[in-house]
Image (cartoon, rainbow, N blue to C red):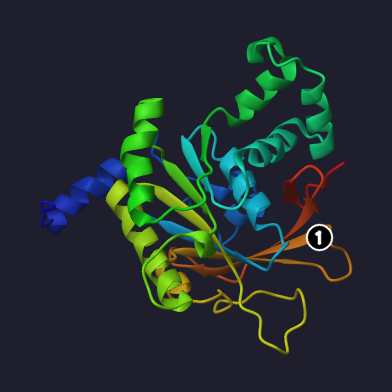
């Protein structure tokens, strides 16, 4: 049985003072990715261990690309990406395209030109990939429940790399294994367990979810607080909830909206460029070539 502890206000005062004054506190600042998220009274404060964030979006919106961009910008925090949808090889190709600023097909072409026996460190482009993504590890098992996830964080990741991850990304909740007679029950349990796992393992947890569309809803369109598919537990469990949708007239334009922010205000919308060939998402104000 887990040992239970009681903390007085004096205890918490001491912990909080140590935390906010730490020389290198463990936190994930999303404004490293989208600078506008860190600006103004409605700024999104950095995520800290024990917090759970969700990203909501329709099929094909770019949820996985969003998660991979966050993973890359999490550098130098050790990051574990649990990719339940894509095979590891395709996940790597997309990461490599992001890191090199190249199209995915060009990454494939480059690797086809390299004999299998050539050592990785001999290639300059591989050095570029590692410099931007050396902090990221991937688990591409397709069947993952809360017990396996906690084991990955507490046992398998440390055995492989010598320390626990600081950031854990799950793509996506609908593919997680969980108990329940109906899909609603399974997704609800998974969302609640992700929150518990974030606290129990002291990690920053980020997960994607598809959205629910009614029979009269058109494809695309703005995402709202209660748009999560299959469960209300997603918005309840999340400390930060971001919604994604694409522009109907220009699919290269992506909107990121803060739907819920327990440490500040919600409602901020950041307009972004979505480069599907390179898997990059950047602020529209910053521009891309």
Q: Secondary structure at mark 1?
A: strand
Q: Is residue 227 visible?
A: yes
Instruction: Give the image quarter of residue 255.
Output: bottom right
Q: Is residue 49 visible?
A: no
- Going by the image, does 100 lie left or right of 85? right
Q: Judge by depth and name the residue closer to the eye, 158 or 286.
A: 158
Label count reads 1
Residue ID at (42%, 74%): 233
Where's residue 250, x and y in %?
88, 64
Where's residue 238, x and y in %?
44, 65
Give the position of the C terminus as an image quadrant. Answer: top right
- Going by the image, does 4 lie left or right of 178? left
Q: From what the image shows, is residue 275 above or below residue 180?
A: above
Residue ID at (41%, 38%): 165
Where's residue 51, x and y in %?
39, 56
- Going by the image, does 190 lie left or right of 215? left
Residue ID at (60%, 71%): 267
Where's residue 187, x and y in %?
45, 70
Q: From what the image shows, is residue 209 above or below residue 122?
A: below
Q: Judge by depth and name the residue closer to the eye, 155 or 177.
A: 177
Residue of label 1? 253
Residue at the far bottom in the pictured view = 216
How many C-alpha atoms fall within 10 Å of the one at disc 1: few (<14), some, or many (≥20)? some
Q: Judge by depth and name the residue closer to the eye, 171 or 10.
A: 171
Q: Judge by depth and name the residue closer to the eye, 107 or 257.
A: 107
């Amino acid at each position: 049985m887990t040992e239970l502890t009681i903390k007085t206000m004096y205890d918490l005062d001491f912990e909080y003072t140590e935390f906010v004054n730490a020389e290198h506190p463990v936190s994930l600042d999303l404004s490293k990715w989208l600078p506008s998220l860190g600006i103004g009274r409605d700024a999104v404060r950095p995520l800290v261990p024990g917090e759970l964030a969700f990203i909501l979006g329709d099929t094909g919106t770019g949820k996985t690309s969003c998660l991979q961009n966050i993973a890359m910008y999490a550098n130098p925090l050790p990051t574990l990406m649990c990719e339940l949808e894509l095979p590891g090889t395709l996940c790597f190709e997309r990461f490599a395209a992001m890191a090199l600023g190249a199209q995915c097909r060009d990454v494939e072409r480059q690797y086809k030109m390299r004999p299998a026996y050539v050592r990785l460190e001999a290639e300059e482009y591989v050095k570029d990939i590692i410099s931007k993504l050396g902090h990221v590890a991937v688990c591409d098992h397709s069947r993952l429940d809360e017990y396996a996830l906690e084991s990955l964080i507490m046992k398998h990741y440390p055995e492989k790399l010598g320390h626990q991850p600081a950031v854990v990304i799950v793509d996506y909740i609908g593919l997680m294994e969980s108990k329940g007679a109906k899909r609603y029950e399974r997704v609800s349990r998974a969302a609640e367990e992700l929150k518990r796992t974030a606290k129990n393992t002291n990690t920053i947890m980020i997960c994607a979810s598809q959205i629910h569309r009614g029979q009269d809803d058109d494809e695309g369109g703005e995402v709202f607080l209660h748009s999560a598919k299959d469960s209300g537990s997603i918005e309840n469990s999340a400390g930060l909830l971001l919604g994604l949708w694409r522009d109907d007239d220009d699919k290269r334009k992506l909107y990121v909206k803060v739907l819920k922010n327990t440490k500040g205000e919600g409602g901020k919308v950041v307009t972004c460029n979505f480069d599907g060939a390179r898997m990059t998402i950047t602020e529209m104000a910053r521009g891309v070539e």
